[in-house]
Amino acid sequence: MGPEAEGIVKSFTFNDGNEQKFAPMLAKFDNYFTPRTTTVHERAIFNCMPEGSSEAAESFIRRLYEQAGNCNFGDAKDGYIRDRLLVGITDKDLRIEIQRKTFTLEQYIAEVRQSESVKGNVACMQSRSRKTCRSRISKRQPSTSS
């Protein structure tokens, strides 16, 4: 151990002579060097989360749920996710449209998914490539042939 580690070891307190045992010493070092997270920090991350410029809405929604799980929102979790989804989506027209309505989180998610799907369909139609459109449609619908 170097001089820095020795200084850290001196700050540790042990019970029952465990300072000479490897496992308790390792646990103390792990605890010392493991970054501590706080609810405030986790919520700050959550409140700054935007949808990525090429990120699918489903991916953004999943990231919001994952981060919200670290924030101790309790029963208000769905409301926070709904609000962050509204603020974080990149589609400004959709943001304006859904603000005009009072929606639950599930309704917001449905609107965001539907909007993304419709935009994909419009882009497909505008590309004038039947092969591209057929490929896109066949990925969404199961085959009916036996």
Image (tube, rainbow, N blue to C red):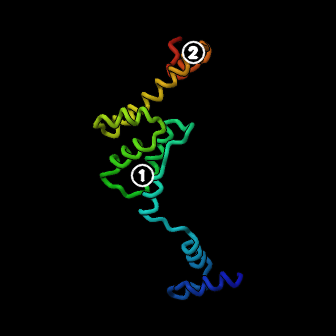
Measured in 3D between alpha carbons, the distance from the residue under mark 2 to the one under mark 1, in whole angstroms, is: 38 Å
- Give the image location of residue 23, x and y in percent: 59, 76
**Residue 134, disc:** 2
Q: Secondary structure at mark 2?
A: helix
Q: Amino acid at mark 2?
A: Arg
Q: Which residue is mark 1?
A: 68
Q: Is residue 8 visible?
A: yes
Q: Amino acid at mark 1?
A: Ala
- The reply to whether discs 2 and 1 touch (Cβ–Cβ < 8 Å) is no
Q: Quadrant of residue 103?
A: top left
Q: Secondary structure at mark 1?
A: helix
Of the image marks 2 and 1, the number of the one nearer the N terminus: 1
- Give the image location of residue 112, x and y in percent: 42, 33
> 99 or 84, which lies in front?
99
- Give the image location of residue 118, x and y in percent: 46, 23
Q: Residue at x 45, y 58 (%)?
A: 44
> 24 or 117, which lies in front?
117
